[in-house]
Image (spheres, rainbow, N blue to C red):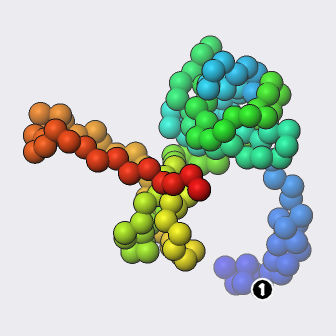
Amino acid sequence: MDHLSRSDFTRYTRMVDQVKTVRPEGRVSQVVGLIAEGDSLGLGIGSLCSILTDQGEEVKAEVVGFKKQKALLMPYGDIRGVRMGSRIVPVSASPMVEVSDQLLGRVIYGMEIPWTAKAALLLPSGIIFTGNPSAPWRANPLQSRWMWVWQPSTA
């Protein structure tokens, strides 16, 4: 142990800093309707990835199934510009949203984009979207048959 404490690790640290890492990347092989089909990259159902368009736009997508050796990806946004050969890059194992008390009173939609025009958010921690589905027979019965839907103005 005495020998290790006297060793100079700067040479090894420099070598590690110079290592070039490999990031897995795949390609879109087909788009049918809203579903993009491409290399699975070892991703599982519910995994999140990005599809990069010719225009340099990044479209987040979730793995929703498999067909033969390919992953079926459901994009979260506009798929214009996605074509055969577009790059697929894994993002995370599961969709996640960052949360804090700053979200109280706000309306958000997919991928944390706020609908409300308040100040920028500072969200320090994240939670995964997935959870256990509730049993329908345990749900409270509807108290009213009216449902109000709010839609943001397009102006």
The residue located at (73%, 46%) in the rendering is 58
Q: Nearer the viewer, residue 154 or 138?
A: 154
Image x and y of residue 18, in percent? 89, 64
Looking at the picture, which amino acid does disc 1 mark? Arg
Q: Please identify the residue farthest to the front as the structure is shown.
A: 155
Image x and y of residue 147, in percent? 25, 43
Residue 40 in the image: above or below residue 54: above
Residue 54 in the image: above or below residue 95: above
Mark yes or no: residue 71 visible: no
Q: Quadrant of residue 3?
A: bottom right
The residue located at (70%, 22%) in the rendering is 31
Q: Nearer the viewer, residue 147 or 139?
A: 147
> On the rendered structure, is 123 left or right of 29?
left
Count residues near mark 1 (Cα–Cα under 10 Å), then give few for <14, some for 14-19, many for 20+. few
Q: Please identify the residue farthest to the top as the structure is shown.
A: 68
The residue located at (56%, 52%) in the rendering is 154
Q: Which residue is mark 1?
A: 6
Q: Nearer the viewer, residue 132 or 3?
A: 132
Q: Quadrant of the N terminus?
A: bottom right
> On the rendered structure, is 139 left or right of 100?
left
The residue located at (10%, 40%) in the rendering is 141
Residue 154 in the image: above or below residue 25: below
